[in-house]
Image (spheres, helix red, strand yellow):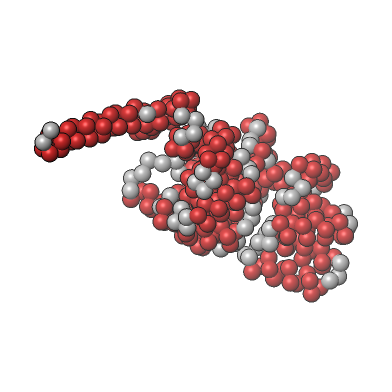
Amino acid sequence: MTSLDFISWFIFFGLTGTTIWLVVTYLRPENVALRKFNEAVKQKDFALALSHCEDGLTRDPNSVNLLVNASAMCIPLKEFEKTLEFCNRGLAITPGNVNLLCNRSAANNNLSRFEEAELDASKAIELDSKQLAAYLNRAFAYLVQRKYKEAVADCNQAQSMNMLDVDIIHAEALNSMNRFDEAMKICQNAMSRMESQSIDADLSGLYVTRGNIYHGMRKPKEAIADFDEAIRINPRCEPAYVNRSGSYLMLGDMKKAQDELDNLNRMKISESLKAYPMYTQIRVYIKQNEWQKAWKVASMALEKYPNSPIVNAMVAFLYLHDNKLKAALDHINKATTLDSFSREAHYIRHQIYDAMNEKDKAESDKKIATDFGYEPYLT
């Protein structure tokens, strides 16, 4: 055999080997499933995409790519427990997989496991400081845990994502810190951006956020208009119904406030939202001088939501009315510890200290409430 023949045979076997390798790779269960997965995602058929991942995992149970994609598909399908299952399987194989950590963080947020969501997002950021989805997930976890400054910082990191979720979390955090003008600017910019880009998106959440800001600015008519628009866009937008009841109360329309609360009772809203309607119901009864009814709701609310700042603030106000100042102070201190930006809690503590004849402390809390822009309307 000449050297030329040897080279020819070498090339032949090399090409044949490469072809076989390519065919085998193409037909690997993981790659077959991933191709089908990608086609389903293009069609936005997330259930089908998930089924392709699950089918591939029956043949290749340790495929991290399939576990990542399966966990991601469970999120829009609201199958959050399954997200955790896929993420845990994948992280057992690759503990430092940032995508799995982000997906698990998102699932934990949706399951109201906010400390776990924060931890997963923090670990993802530690591994990859440019992982914007991790900043978004952590910002939401911070917001719900009333860590508003931290939420704002993470939103600033994630703002290049140019997403509504970032804008909403950012504006809500600023609103909770009583920085209404900054929060409103973010909402208006987001609305302008969506209009200019002709993006077909559900803007109900953005209208709820702007309504919340108007409420904080004591503009209940504007707040109600935004909550109405959110409901028009999405009739199942629970926060719009919940927050509209409070704006009716601020407006002084007790009938509409009570009608809204009765409607919320029929709706069987999400557990995470139930503290606020109870808080508003207490306030309605107080405005109507129905103190026994107010106490009945407050007692149930405190039993269900012992760590809610708004519930503790209302319980403190009721104790103040009954002249049980020590108990009132205990609950209002808890409320201000849980949410140091609560204007109402600081104002109620001012009233309690005033009743206790501790004038300096009373003036200090009154100044905080006033600096936050509080104008009392619960008397």
Q: Which residue is drawn at 48% across and 25% down?
A: 58
Label total for image: 0
> 267 or 161, which is in the foreground?
161
Q: Position of residue 52 (x, y in %)?
A: 43, 27
Against 103, is 161 above or below? below
Judge whether residue 341 can be spotted in this image.
yes
Q: Which residue lies furthest to the front in this view?
A: 1
Which is nearer the eye, 108 or 125? 125
| Side of 141 where 42 appears, left or right | left
Residue located 11% across and 36% down the image: 2
Quadrant in the picture for the C terminus: bottom right
Horizontal and vertical percent position of residue 6: 15, 36
Q: Determine the image quadrant of residue 359.
A: bottom right
Q: Position of residue 191 (x, y in %)?
A: 41, 51
Q: Can residue 228 be seen in this view?
A: no
Nearer to the camera, 287 or 317: 317
Q: Where the N terminus falls, by quadrant?
A: top left
Residue located 50% across and 55% down the image: 127
Give the answer, above or below, for where 173 lies relative to 63: below
Instruction: Identify the residue at image location x=28%, y=32%.
Output: 22
Is 369 drawn above or below residue 61 in the view shown? below
Instruction: Indicate the quadrant where residue 180 lies.
Output: bottom right
The percent coordinates of residue 151 (x first, y second) are 56, 57
246 left or right of 326 in image: left
